[in-house]
Image: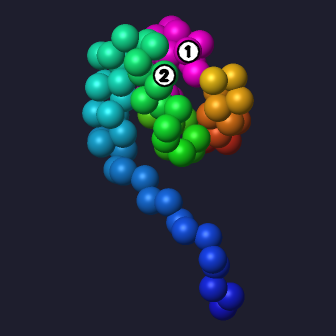
């Protein structure tokens, strides 16, 4: 078996992701956007998918467009 040089990112359990989503939702959208921008796109996507769609959309509106694109690409892979 070849050894991968990539670091595999481990994600929190679903219950923890849901709790993180609740925390992100409780912050103003502009601040929540900044919180999500620093996460791995796949992790941010998993968190956003656990949010109310209207509120998640408001948060995505505050993201850097390139980061938002990466996150939404991950969201489509996870659905």
Q: Earlier in the sequence, mark 1 or mark 2?
A: 2
Please tell me which residue is depicted at 61% across the width and 70% down the height of the picture.
Answer: 6
Please tell me which residue is depicted at 42% across the width and 21% down the height of the picture.
Answer: 32
* x, y percent for residue 15: 30, 41
Task: Label 2, secondary structure: give it.
Answer: helix
Q: Are marks 1 and 2 in contact (CB under 8 Å)?
A: yes
Residue 30 visible in the snapshot: yes
Q: Per the image, is 55 magenta?
A: yes
* x, y percent for residue 76: 68, 34
User: What quarter of the picture does the N terminus occupy?
Assistant: bottom right
Numbered tag placed on residue 33 in the rendering: 2
Q: Establish if 60 lies above or below 10.
A: above
Numbered tag placed on residue 73 in the rendering: none
What is the quadrant of residue 10 in the picture? bottom left
User: What quarter of the picture does the C terminus occupy?
Assistant: top right
Crowdedness near tag 2: few (<14), some (14–19) or many (≥20) residues, C-alpha within 10 Å: many
**Left or right placement of residue 19 versus residue 46 in this view:** left
Bounds of the magenta span? 48-63
């Amino acid at each position: 078996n070849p050894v991968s040089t990539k670091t595999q990112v481990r994600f929190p359990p679903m219950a923890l992701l849901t709790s993180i989503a609740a925390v992100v939702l409780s912050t103003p959208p502009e601040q929540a956007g900044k919180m999500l921008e620093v996460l791995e796109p796949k992790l941010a996507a998993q968190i956003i998918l656990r949010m109310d769609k209207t509120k998640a959309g408001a948060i995505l509106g505050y993201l850097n467009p390139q980061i938002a694109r990466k996150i939404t690409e991950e969201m489509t892979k996870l659905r």
